[in-house]
């Protein structure tokens, strides 16, 4: 047996990356089918948006009530959501994420589009970014009747957890830099970054060395063509040569962090950079004390998870 096939380069608990480029996924790959959720009244369905790549989205629709527009159809905000998982694990059909999005859709009364992008290392980055960009444009083009009949492209939100928060930032910047491909004009009202994954070639004060080294090694495996390694603008939005944060296409932003998260120094630096950038929008910071990275996924229903979700719902409501 080739020794490279058994040499582990990264062991992140839920997955292992090997020297020969393959991965073993030991967690966070469970799935649950779309359908009607009796607890919230939300209905979901999966739609393949690219037959070649197999990329699909999971659409969520709350109970439709009284008509609100001139066409006699209820128009609801659109939330495009990107799941987390280091770009290596996770999916739009993960039971924990499915449950969370059902709750958000019911409470905020919006349509959600949860993106199932391709995972590394089988599909090296920038595949996940490309898939997410395609899904965003697909959603805002009204390609599905749920979106064309009930989606309000004048009230669009982007959100993501961990690696998905990184993607949400990059999609918001991409819209500002290049504009949407979709023919229908759209307005991104807000972007929510839930414990977004950022890093850089230079370790920051307060950033644990072991964690930083692990991220650096993982990034080199899943994105070998990254420009500048961890200073690729997609991982380090403050790196030299990164697009100006004034290009953020949203009008409001919510950056959420946890005090015990090793990524917290980067997230705070990002928040401070956005505030200093001259960007014309409004950015808010929400920090969960005594908790770690993406705790609200594992500790669903805990008091601090509820408090965080309450803040997210308030943001979606315009507060």
Image: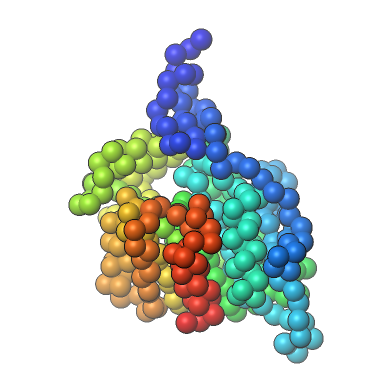
In the rendered image of this protein, does residue 120 appear above or below residue 135?
A: above
Q: Quadrant of residue 60?
A: bottom right
The image shows residue 306 at horizontal and vertical percentages of 50, 67
Q: Residue at x 56, y 66 (%)?
A: 180
In the rendered image of this protein, does residue 161 appear above or below residue 4?
A: below
Q: How is the image coloured?
A: rainbow
Which residue is at the front of the view, 171 or 292? 292
Taking the image as shown, residue 72 lies to the left or right of residue 85, namely: right
**Does residue 270 appear anywhere in the picture?**
no
The image shows residue 221 at horizontal and vertical percentages of 42, 34
The image shows residue 269 at horizontal and vertical percentages of 28, 61
Q: Quadrant of residue 40?
A: bottom right
- Name the outermost residue toward the top: 1
Q: Residue at x 36, y 41 (%)?
A: 215
Q: Residue at x 53, y 30 (%)?
A: 24
Which residue is at the front of the view, 7 or 127? 7
Which residue is at the front of the view, 142 or 85? 85
**Does residue 260 appear anywhere in the picture?**
yes
Q: Residue at x 47, y 73 (%)?
A: 311
């Amino acid at each position: 047996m080739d020794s490279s096939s058994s040499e582990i380069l990264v062991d992140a608990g839920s997955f292992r990356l090997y020297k020969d480029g393959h991965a073993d996924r030991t967690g966070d790959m469970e799935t649950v089918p779309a359908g009607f959720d009796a607890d919230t009244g939300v209905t979901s369905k999966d739609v393949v948006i690219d037959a070649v790549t197999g990329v699909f989205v999971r659409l969520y629709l709350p109970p439709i009530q009284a008509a609100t527009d001139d066409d006699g159809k209820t128009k609801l905000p659109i939330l495009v959501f990107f799941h987390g998982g280091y770009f290596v694990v996770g999916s739009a059909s993960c039971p924990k994420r499915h449950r969370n999005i059902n709750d958000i859709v019911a409470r905020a009364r919006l349509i959600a589009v949860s993106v199932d992008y391709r995972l590394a290392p089988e599909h090296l980055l920038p595949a996940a970014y490309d898939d997410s960009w395609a899904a965003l444009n697909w959603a805002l083009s009204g390609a599905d009747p749920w979106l064309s009949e009930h989606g309000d492209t004048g009230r669009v939100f982007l959100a993501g957890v961990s690696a998905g928060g990184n993607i949400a930032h990059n999609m918001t910047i991409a819209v500002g830099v290049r504009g949407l491909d979709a023919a229908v004009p759209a307005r991104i009202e807000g972007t929510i970054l839930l414990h977004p994954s950022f890093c850089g070639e230079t370790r920051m004060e307060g950033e644990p060395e072991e964690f930083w080294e692990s991220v650096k090694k993982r990034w080199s495996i899943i994105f070998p063509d990254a420009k500048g390694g961890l200073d690729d603008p997609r991982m380090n939005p403050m790196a030299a040569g990164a697009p100006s944060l004034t290009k953020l296409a949203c009008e409001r932003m919510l950056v959420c962090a946890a005090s015990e998260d090793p990524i917290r120094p980067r997230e705070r630096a990002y928040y401070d950079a956005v505030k200093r950038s001259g960007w014309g929008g409004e950015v808010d910071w929400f920090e969960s004390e005594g908790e770690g990275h993406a705790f609200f996924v594992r500790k669903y229903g805990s008091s601090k998870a509820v408090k965080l979700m309450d803040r997210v719902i308030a943001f979606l409501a315009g507060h």
